[in-house]
Image (cartoon, rainbow, N blue to C red):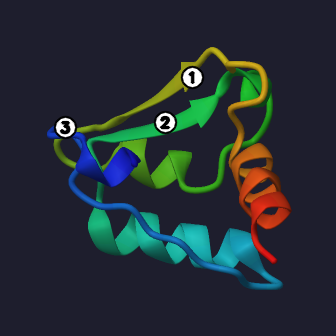
Amino acid sequence: NIAALDVVDAVCVFQDDDSNKVLEYLVAETKPAVLVKGADYVGKSVVGSDIIVNQNPPGCVVFVDLIPDSSTTAFVNKIKALTP
């Protein structure tokens, strides 16, 4: 569980038709020092990145390598497959 990591202050789970709006709100309200996205977002627009890099002190957006079969979707599908 990612929330169990000492370096993680908060984890927000949500489902919304306008997820970009929710993400931008969360970033604006929490003002994280680091926003982590998967490497598949390199070169793409990252919602909230402008807020993070322009806050005082500035934060940063970090891209991490993807691990095969480790996406949130993959975990949810595994759980669904085990749930009657």
Question: Which residue is located at x 77 percent, y 51 percent?
Answer: 78
The C terminus, quarter of image: bottom right
**Residue 36 — which label?**
2
Q: Residue furthest top?
A: 65
Q: Secondary structure at mark 3?
A: loop
Residue type at mark 2 is Val
Image location of residue 52, percent across then percent down: 39, 47
Q: Position of residue 3 (x, y in %)?
A: 31, 53
3 or 2: mark nearer the eye: 3
Of pointers 3 and 2, the one earlier in the residue sequence: 3
Q: Residue at x 69, y 20 (%)?
A: 66
State if disc 2 and disc 1 touch (CB < 8 Å): yes
Q: CA distance from mark 1 to mark 2?
A: 6 Å
Residue 77 x/y as whole percent: 82, 55
Q: Is residue 36 above or below residue 62?
A: below
> Badge 3 local density, few (<14 within 10 Å), some, or many (20+)?
few
Is 37 on the left-hand or right-hand side of 8?
A: right
Q: Which mark is residue 63?
A: 1
Residue that mark 3 sits on: 7
Q: Residue at x 77, y 29 (%)?
A: 69
The kind of secondary structure element at disc 2 is strand
